[in-house]
Structure formats: C-alpha cells, structure tokens
Image: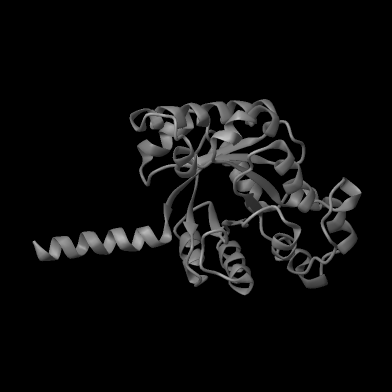
Amino acid sequence: MNERLKKIKEKMEQGKPVVGVFVLFADSSVSEIVGYSGCDFVWIDSEHGMMDRREIYHHVLAAQATGACAFVRVPGVEYYQIKNTLDMGPDGIIFPFVNTPEIARQAVEACTYPADGGKRGIGPLRAIKYGIDNESEYLRQAKDEVWKIFQIESVEAVEHLEEIAKVPGYQSLFVGPADLGMSMTEVDPKDKSARIAEVQTRAAQLAAENGKYCGSCAGPTKESCQELVDRGVQWMTIAQDARIISAYLAEAVRNISE
C-alpha cells in the first residue's frame, strides 16, 4: 500500500474524518488546488465530469503530486472503461450504481489480474513508473495497490447491501445520497433524509463487519462531517468544484449589489 493510502487509512483508524472534493472540470489544476488545500483525496469524476482519458491522466498526476489520493470514478464496470485508467496508477477506482453482488464481482474482476481470479489485461504504464518498477512485482501486489470502491446509490443496492458487502476483493462502500434519494420513489420526501441516514449507518456497520471502510457525502462544515462520523462513516466528499465557484461568486455578486 502506498503512502497516500496509508495516510488516509491511519486517519480513519484514529476516528478522524477523511475529506475530499468532487472534481468535474477538465483542467487538472483543479485537482492540484484541491490537494494543496489539505484534502486527503480528489474524486476525479469521469462518470459525470467533462474530461477525456488524457485529462483523467493529468488529474491523477496533479492530485498525487500534492500528496492527495487520486480516486477516479469510472462510468461502469465494463473492462474497456477501466483498464486504461488502472494503468495510469490511481489510488482508487469508484464504481457507480453497484446494485447487485454480481456487479460488485464484475468490478473486482476488472481491477484484478488473472493470477488473483480477475480479468484485468496486462499493460501497466505509469502504475510501474513507466518501467522503472519491477513489473512482475507489481502484478503480484496490484490487487492491494488500488482501492475498489462500490457506490450504494439505489433502493436495489440497499436491498442487496448485505450480499454486496460480503463480496471479496474491494476496500470500501460509498453511500451516494443524491441518487439514493431519487430512487426512493415510494418514500415521503419528508422522510428521505432519515432513511438515507439509516442506510449510511447500516452500510458502515456491514463494511466494518467485513473489514472494509465506508464513505458518503457531507457538507463543507465540521458539524456535517461529524454527523457522518457518528454513523460510522469514515471518509466523505465535502464539495464539488463547480459549485464551490458558483456559490462563492453568486454570494459575492449579491453582497456587491445590495
């Protein structure tokens, strides 16, 4: 395990919140800013973000150069969407909508070489420092070098949560409250926040029982992060790059115009 992952693991084991920011803009300087700000990780979003492969690569470089972990959210579990990103050497791969244990197993297989029961194709590049590191050694250790993170963000996923949590080979669950709330079509809107909190608590419990971690989304306040910590959640996103800029500017314009 690299030093960046060791650092966040130590913080989580000490009960300290591990925080990061969603990055959707293509310019990798945003990830650099997030890392230099003191965030523990950068959530590089290639599911919703406006970036191509080269730009994802530059975001990984920028985040890691500051000492922050580079977690890349991929669009799905198809191998062609993942293998190129893995070879860039990120610290974690985040899989959206892991609704069933079958999808969870596919995700792990896509990140794991055949010797360890997976289907990842061999071709590491930056992951072995462009050939400076021993490739054979990397192949033996790769399954532990990249975190596999399952997003729980639908009612279907909640229904299969216990089975998903037992799938071998991943490192963390992550409860996505926005999509999870959207999927709760039968729940009174007034009750959704409480239901989501229950899912966060349950996911954290199941993750711990299986020797894994749990993450979710918080607001940019100490109180919001502490609420999640109290539910057993150890790492959390606290903002999104576009919303940071738009909220700051909108507030500034309102204050100037008054």
Q: Residue at x 57, y 61 (%)?
A: 46
Front residue (pair 95, 89) = 95
Q: Nearer the viewer, residue 120 or 64?
A: 120
Taking the view exactly as shown, the residue that stands out farthest to the left is 258
Q: Position of residue 206 (x, y in %)?
A: 63, 27
Q: Nearer the viewer, residue 48 or 243?
A: 48
Q: Is residue 235 visible to the viewer in this orientation of the structure?
A: no
Res 225 visible: yes
What percent of the width, then of the height, locates residue 56?
A: 60, 67
Q: Give above or below for 145 relative to 26.
A: above
The residue at the point 74 percent across, 40 percent down is 102
Residue 147 as seen in the image, left or right of residue 22: right
Relative horizontal placement of residue 17, taking residue 190 as reference (left or right): right
Residue 29 location, x and y as percent?
49, 71
Q: Position of residue 136 (x, y in %)?
A: 90, 60
**Which residue corresponds to the image point at 21% horizontal and 63% vertical from the top-left?**
252
Quarter of the image with the C terminus in it: bottom left
Q: How is the image coloured?
A: one colour
Horizontal placement of 121 versus 17: left or right?
Answer: right
Position of residue 213 relative to residue 88, above or below, is above
